[in-house]
Amino acid sequence: MTLAIEHLEVSYGRLAAVRDATVTVASGEIVALVGPNGAGKSTTLLAAAGALQPRGGTITLDGASLLGLSPEQRVRRDLAMVPEGREIFRTLTVAENLTVAAGAGRAKPGTAEVMDELLALFPILRERLRQPAGQLSGGEQQQLAIARALMTRPRYLLIDEPSLGLAPLVVKRVYEMLTELRRRQGLAILVVEQSMRRVLSVADKVCVMRDGRVVATFAGEDLSDRRRLEQVYFGLAD
Amino acid sequence: MVQTLINAISLGSIYALVALGIGLLFGVLKVINFAHGDFITIGAFALIIPSSQAAAEMGIGLMPWPLVIAGVAAVVVLTALAAEFLVFRPLRGADSATVMIASFALGYFLQSSLLLVFGSRPKSVNLWSQLNVPVVLGGAETSLLQIIIIAATALLIAGLGFLMRYTSVGLAMRAAAENFRMARLVGVRANLVIGAAIALSGILAAAVSLLIVVQTGVLSYRMGVPLMIFGFVATVIGGMGSLLGSAVGGFAVGIVSVLAQTFLPESARPFRDAVVFSVVFLVLMLRPKGLIGGGQRGERI
Amino acid sequence: MSAASSRPGTVRRFETPVILVAGLAFLVLLATWVPGIVSPRSIAQLMIWVVLVVGLYTFSGLSGIISFGQTTFSTIAAYCVAWLTLNPFVKASSMPGLPQFILSASLHPLASAAISIAVAAAIGLVVALAVMRLAGEAATIATFALLIVVNSIYGNWNSVTGGMSSIVGIPIVVGVWIAFGTAVLAIVVAYAFQTSRGGLMLQASRDDEVAARASGIEVKRWRIIAFVISAALMGLGGVVQAHFLGVISVESFYLGTTFMTLAMLVVGGRSSLTGAVVGAVILSLVTSVLRGLERGVELGSVNLQIPSGIQEVALGALMLVMLVRRRRGLCGLWEARFSRGDAD
């Protein structure tokens, strides 16, 4: 049970954004993809979610290729994404933001239960159900974006810079939620972050990306070697 | 005075329906459909039996009225869906200029196909002429047809509003209109949403076909073009991408037209359209984003 | 982007217009020296299409903003020609509402051409100042509205334009060589603008929205300038057409012409001057073959004839297929060159 991105290449016109990225996420794992601005992390996620067409490499879910599938088809294979900057539907109410994702998912029974469960996890959203989502604060929008992705009942969640623009306390809360989700539902999470510090405490595996390539992957014991991690991150070692 | 008002509202109704058809597709697809007027023309020609004879012979138009409405709507919706499959879908992801040219080419293709089949001479048809009876309302004389136009428009707008607000397809369309990529990332089926938008746009076009044929009694292969222009103008002044704006824009354009018609001196009447467009230009100079479409980025539908 | 800007040497700088002009000259020579292949008249008409398509390209091709209104300027200039060159007696009966100094005018075609093109350009400037305030789609709609408005004014202002009826009796002074000369002029003007700083900036803004936004005000200014040059070239096309056929009407440069010029530009490739010229040539030839077939062709004992009206339907279908299959047109961004290997 794995989401495997292997030797991915993506370019915007003539500009190569991702040259060689290999990241695998097993079910129940939290994997962090870190690297400096412009390394190609977000592009990798968008390609995995189907929003960008890769030029080379493979993307498989449980052994079956996802290439050529539209984003909405990938959602039906239990892959969901929370993009950078949240991208909630600002003119829709909070409830509508959640319903639109539920209606789109596979016809799983118990949409209402899922919604209840999520609203228990994100109580602030319950208070705001009837408000246009554009009126929420940044932290609330991030929670809504995550909840919206979870409405599709994914087994794999791709999440891009959840800490961007949020206060440290809110970020802490978001990460607590992600670990909680993993614990409860066995959700596999691929999280992109610029800062390594944030993800070290939660990630089972850290992939470092630079100039469009995943240059190193750390797991288990290696994760405690902070010095080496930092050297790789800043390009001082490979 | 009441009579002028009714004239203005009924003309505005037609323009509002055209503008909604254009605005709906623009909202979801971000495509200006230059073939929308030709969808209207196709709906009108669907009433008669194909022939290049000068005298039109009714086909669908002879049936009982619910079947006429259903038949015309079916023809237009099928045409619109065929356009989606053959032209718009293969161009998904192309830049908006390409898609605009394609819709213009589609319009030209439809016009020249109609010309080939039906000939260039305008044909007179007699559909539901009993609706053109005068009625007195609030002391002013008007026709039953104008009241029907207004009522039908109100019904269609209410129906559209209900659909957008309370159904899952409507919700998906609103989400897609605001952020198409994100809608797909939460599983909204792109083809379903676009298909729904284009079919609805076709239904609105079919409604205009019927209303305009009953009102004017004439068919010609370019009859949809001027209507479409007024519809465009209405969507632009209403603020592109806002359905409410399209409707309001349509009524505004209708009212300005009727006022120009009523108060311009006799010799200037032929230039009514030019006057209306000048007013529109002025509005755009003052508010480039339209009357309703505010400054914010997210388009509303 | 055009690679021409970065290349040294005057010969190489001008290779694109030289090749294009040589190609057109070949067609003219073919028509005048080898009888029976293609008539000089249809080559003259082809040259006028080249003028119109190059005119459209100068704005829409370089800026990336589609205009459905450029043929309006051909209408304006062509009517101006009629007002200035028609026999005063004819004018007095068909267009009695004209002011006295125009009614009595009977100018030399060159003088009237200059005035007519200037009028088209001036109106183009006014329109551009207004339309360029609008963004992308709204600007395109505005150009379409312009087409309809001017058509409705000219079609209804009976005392000045003769309304819907055709104006006949404009001096016929254009033959294949003059038509060729104006096509050359249009190509040279368009190429000079395309390789100027402003032209390069427009192309950069067309290909890259970030660049467009970064230099917003200047891009807008160059768009206005491009629009005016385009209006002047469309006006030139209108003038030549009027003097070629001797007849004009409000339908001469209306939806049919708008479609035709766009189809030519799209089929050839709307992002290159070569594409504009190639598209005009190919579609002109295709249409004249189809027109011939509509009239009927004797093939041995069989008279081959297609129903009239097929031509328009076929062109519409061709353009749609082209857009769906090869949306950048035949030429894409490529410009004709002697040297190989730098096709962009």
Image (cartoon, coloured by chain):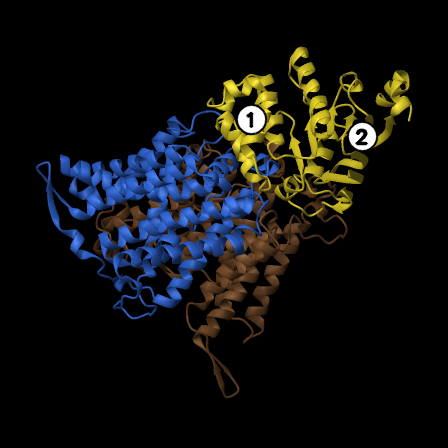
Chain colours: A yellow, B blue, C brown
Which chain letter goes with mark 1?
Answer: A
Amino acid carrying mark 2 in the image = Asp
Label ID, residue A211: 2
For image coordinates 63% across by 34% down, the residue present is A153
Eyeballing the image, is B116 above or below A126? below
Q: Residues within 10 Å of mark 2 (few under 14, many from 20)?
A: some
Q: Nearer the viewer, residue C167 or C175?
A: C167
Circle 1: is it few (<14), some (14-19), or many (20+) Cα within 10 Å? some
Picture quadrant where residue A104 is located: top right
Front residue of A193 and A30: A30
Which part of the image, by quadrant, shows the N terminus of chain C? top right
The quadrant holding residue B264 is top left
* Residue A130: mark: none
C120 or A184, which lies in front? Answer: A184
Badge 2 marks a residue whose secondary structure is: loop
Tell which of B1 and C288 is nearer to you.
B1
Q: Answer yes or no: is residue A118 visible.
A: yes
Disc 2 sits on a residue from what chain?
A
First along the sequence among labels 2 and 1: 1
User: Where B57 falls versus B134 (above or below)?
Assistant: below
Are dots 2 and 1 on a single chain?
yes
Q: Residue furthest bottom?
A: C301
List the residue tagged with mark 1: A116
In the displayed structure image, the side of residue C200 where residue B232 appears, left or right: left
Whether residue C111 can be seen here: no
Inter-mark Cα distance, 2 to 1: 42 Å
Type of amino acid at the residue the image marks with label 1: Asp
From the viewer's perspective, is A19 left or right of C20?
A: right
Q: Position of residue B258 (x, y in %)?
A: 22, 39
